[in-house]
Image: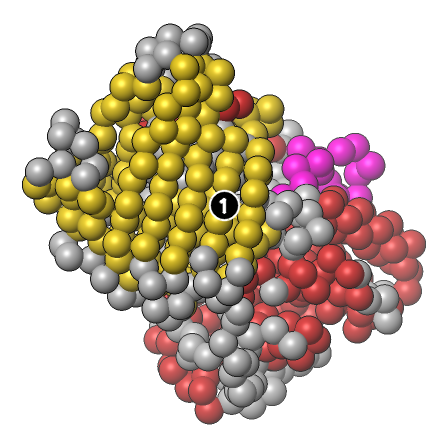
Amino acid sequence: MPDSAFPRPAGALTSLVRDLRAAADGALPELTFTAYRDFADTGNRLRYERRYFRRRAVLAARAAQALLDPDADPAPLADTLWAVCDEYSWALPAHERHGTRPDRCVDLFAAETAHTLAETVAALGDRLDPRVADRVRAEVERRVFEPYADPRPLDWEGFGNNWESVCGGAVGMAALALLGDRPADGDRLAAMLDRSRRAMDRYLAGFGDDGGCAEGVDYWVYGFGYFVYFAEALRAYTGEDLLAGGKVREIASFPQRVSLGGGAYVPFSDASERPWLPAGLLTRLAERFGTAPAQVVPSFHDDHCYRWGHLSRTLAWFRPLDPLAAAEPSGHLPDLGWVVHRGRFAFAAKGGHNDEPHNHNDLGHFILHTRGESVLDDLGAGEYTAAYFRSGRYDVLQPSSLGHSVPVVDGEVQLPGRDRAAKVLRYHADGGTVCFDLDLTAAYQVAGLRSLVRRFHWWPQGRLELTDEIDTERALPVDEIFISRRRPSLSAGSADWDGLVTLARACPQASVEELLTTDHQGRPDRVYRLRCPVLAPAGRSSHRFVFHLR
């Protein structure tokens, strides 16, 4: 982060700068009590959060504009900073349970707000009215620094996921911005940075040696992005390099290894198929690790939360770099239990366990991707509500087994829990075909089920053989489920998804259910569930399904 202004933006960022100017002219939505209480009253998050994030858009745009143009009038930004200091809480209502008081709750967004305000005030220096600067410093101190300096554990310490790196990184960067040039605060700063380092250690410990992110690429962007931003800020201040750890290189290459091609990525968990990857983050990782650089011109509106960390580092770090050669066609993340193969067609499948961050009960789930679309699909994140993160989570379509292409055995779906784990029996890729076999028995609690093994055999020409082998003590009905956002047509026991994917001889009794839900942004989402009922007789039996992609 520059001391006083960003460097002259690269030509590729012209559209981003234009977006910033337009957003800076926008009005700040009011955060009313009616909007604030909505989550507690109804469980709805979006109505308040849309207002909150539009305010952060104006804040980020005005801060960036002031730093891009040293001659810009700082008055609109000063008014925005003052208004943010007036907010009842910087934390989201859905997150206030993680703090003792709403106005001192250090959640993801309170930490990010402190980071935005701190770097803005520090960079603007005497261009900003001292009354505004002093108030910003006081509010950051009261709302964030004091709870962070308190030795009592914060609720998210121990999560081992993106909360650790975002909260620890954002507060650490805020402390560097406001306390880094004040020798009298040296001991306090050192203690806060040490707390942030411990958060980063816990974040990294959540990864296996393969560097795979169980939360998917979107949360890789979020969590690993703030890890990198803090690491580079710390390196600039102390010379210490948190990016030098061996596992970090593997984590940095995660998106490349789960790419489906054409800007699409495996959307397991609460991820999306086409996530936004910040150009500044990709540039820095390419420089440090030789990973794939940014190839897409960013828009200010790519990040619907308008995070200062992503925006400021894109403005400061982005530069056009030559693209890498195409990634290897096969990717296997043994610790995560994922397999990916890409080419003209793409296939992905997962094992893992059913207590992962942003968990879905989806052991044995798979994706078939053709012509830029996942036809046999993963629904990604649903709309975040109170129920989504509480006991009713698996009544919601997206995280439930019924929202994934996995079997239902004797009417029972997969159960959540760390012990509900898939065992990888085999992975083999010979440059042509891919074989991936999973023991899914532990995912189910069904009387009489001795074992359930799912075998994938993939040919890169666009053919998948899926075989479920079942061993039972008694005859058990099994519904083989296949999920898509396209309605399949049924004929003579076969299924066809608009000529993109066909399933030969599905079963004579196959049926299609149309499901209406809402996606992560609250928009209507229409889903089709193909249900193929079969009977597993007592003893050993197998059920084979052959898919062809076009």
The image shows residue 129 at horizontal and vertical percentages of 61, 71
Residue pointed to by mark 1: 436
Residue 149 forms part of the magenta stretch: yes
Which residue sits furthest front?
540
Local packing at callout 1 (Cα closer than 10 Å; few below 14, some 14-19, many 20+) is: many
Residue drawn 14% across the image and 27% down it: 509
Query: Residue 274 vs residue 493: left or right?
Result: right
Residue drawn 65% across the image and 77% down it: 290
The image shows residue 94 at horizontal and vertical percentages of 47, 35
**Relative to 66, is 96 above or below?**
above
Indicate the quadrant where residue 16 lies: bottom left
Residue in the foreground of this view, choosing between 391 and 177: 391
**Relative to 433, is 517 above or below?**
above
The image shows residue 27 at horizontal and vertical percentages of 35, 63
Residue in the foreground of this view, choosing between 500 and 126: 500
Which residue sits furthest left?
491
The image shows residue 405 at horizontal and vertical percentages of 34, 37
Scheme of colours in the image: secondary structure
Tell me the quadrant of the picture where the C terminus can be found.
Answer: bottom left
Dot 1 amino acid type: Phe
Query: Residue 37 vs residue 131: left or right?
Result: left
Question: Is residue 134 something that shows in the picture?
Answer: no
Q: Secondary structure at mark 1?
A: strand
Task: Report the span colored magenta.
Answer: 143-164
Question: Is residue 493 something that shows in the picture?
Answer: yes
Residue drawn 35% across the image and 46% down it: 465
